[in-house]
Amino acid sequence: MKPFWIYYQKEMLEASRTYKWIWVPAVFLLLGIMQPVSTYYLPEILTMSGEVPPEAAALFTIPSADSVMASTLSQFSTIGLLVLVLAGMNTVAGERATGTAELVLTRTVSTLPMMGAKWAAMMTLMLVSFALGLAGAAYYTHQLIGPLEWGAVASGGLLYAVWLAWIVTLVLPLGAVLRGPAAAFISLGTAAALSLLSGLLPSRFQWSPGRLSSMAAEWMLGAGAGAWAPVIAALLIMLLSIIAAAGLLRRSPLSPQS
Amino acid sequence: MTEKLLSIHELTKSIGSITPVKGISFDLKRGGCTALLGPNGAGKTTTLRMLAGLIPPTRGEIKHGSADKQTNDWRHRIGYLPQYPKFYSWMSGKEYLSFSAKLSGLSGQKALQRSQEVIEMVGLQQASKRRISGYSGGMKQRLGIAQALVHEPELIMLDEPVSALDPIGRREVMDLLNRLRGEVTILFSTHVLHDAEEICDDMVLMVDGEIAEKGALSELRSKYRQPVLSIEVEPGERELAWLHGLSKRSFVQEAEVGKHRAKLTVTDMGAARAALIKELADNGIELLRFEAGTSSLEDMFMKVVGP
């Protein structure tokens, strides 16, 4: 277990030295706060813009607290996910491309602790940022719109975190064979494709981890269905990704260019 | 003293259709310094990467330690410096060294202590707390050597440690390697014969993935020592004709004739010198320079490596 901790400390130090610990949580916090605040002020914004007749603006009803929370999640799905994947895309691909892996890998027999530590560090950053964003959203929703059911928010958030986690984990094995941007693009593409497929053919893709984001939103609205199959699928994908990434990195520790 | 630290047998590496290393075998003696010599593209880097455990060999075996007891912690007992060492530029020199030391199994306390020792050894005390991104090329190379030494390995493998350095940086690294001789076993690759002659006892010369020549430097030197005469004359037709006629003399083994100079490898220096001086005087050749000496490893290197 010792190499794992050495790598984990190194990854955390790297994330803070490269300011990931500032901008990723900041983006999530901003995204989380924006949704309830902009929903709350939307009627006033519409009236002020002057082109909407006051009658129409009056028709606008402020949605319920839990549906605001559910739509916050969709904010995280786009920009939040992009930020996480971009922050994580070079953890493996970068080490191969710059050649820092060459020196590190001569010192260790197994790449598994290294990959595990990279994954754990990414998860730490993701969980802290997401929790911060969700807490910000919940606080403002509670203050501006109405009381929330904290249990539903927490369980929905947890489910959503699993969804973020498996997509972010995909950059590890992809980074072990491709360059950083390509890895990021493919992992985001996979996420989009799986979400789309499970939306189009819901009965066929009961197990698809792509359903997790929409299920998390349902859980927040208090109408949760059982989510075991997709959660287990997501956990399996993560486990396989880490093992595959470790194997692939051992096989080709250096990019062809270096 | 003659204990084998590492022996490789029929080591081969194929990448796709090309085979950069074609079945090489050699041994490293404990405490020795061996140069892996060869022109660019001879397969030196590939060999070292295999020895460092970075890439698996296609065929052949690498034995660490003495022949019978094969241990698994050999990675902790070698230090490796790649040709272009790359560090985490956001770390400071000292942080990088203690990170490397800890990865090689040193405890936190010991890692810090060793980092400080090797920093002083390579002379980076002033820069030890600065980020590596601000280091110069020479400083990075010295940091690379420091990281290869930090876990007190038995064997260090350096890939072209001085090729990218200016003369002063080169001097510093060579002096450092000279100080390390005896303490650790050194294997380093280079394409400069002079560097190898300066600090090494043994050499392995690779050309096109094969070993062209190997052995102790002193043996090789006497093996390839041959009497050589070099003659330079004033430009002129008579002189040129005479130079071209030289290769037909009985004592001449090999002749390289240029525009107004010739380099002769001869069998008997005494006889050749006497005969040639007589000829020069008789024919009234306008002589510029006449030098008798021996061929060096440089000539051997050029001959083996050349087309």
Image (cartoon, grey):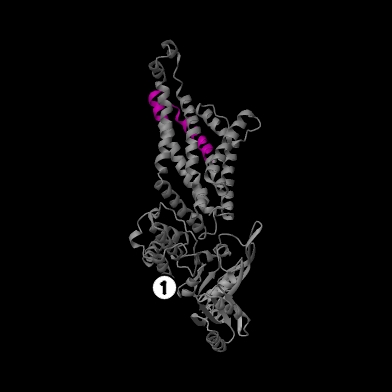
Q: Quadrant of residue B141?
A: bottom left
Q: Quadrant of residue A226?
A: top right
Q: Is residue A139 magenta?
A: yes
Mark 1 nearby-residue class (10 Å; few <14, some 14–19, many ≥20): few
Q: Percent x, y for residue B171?
A: 41, 69
Q: Residue at x 33, y 60 (%)?
A: B126
Q: Nearer the viewer, residue A192 or B135?
A: B135
Give the magenta range.
A137-165
Q: Nearer the viewer, residue B206 or A249?
A: B206
Asked if residue A19 shows in the view, the reply is: yes
Q: Which residue reaches farthest left?
A: B126
Circle 1 chain: B
Left of A194 or right of it: where is A154?
A: left
Q: Is residue A226 magenta?
A: no
Q: Nearer the viewer, residue B240 or B50?
A: B240
Q: Percent x, y for residue A45?
A: 39, 19
Residue picked out by circle 1: B179
Q: Nearer the viewer, residue B164 or B109?
A: B164
The mark tally for this picture is 1
Q: Percent x, y for residue B189?
A: 52, 67
Tag 1: residue type? Arg
Left of A66 or right of it: where is B247?
A: right
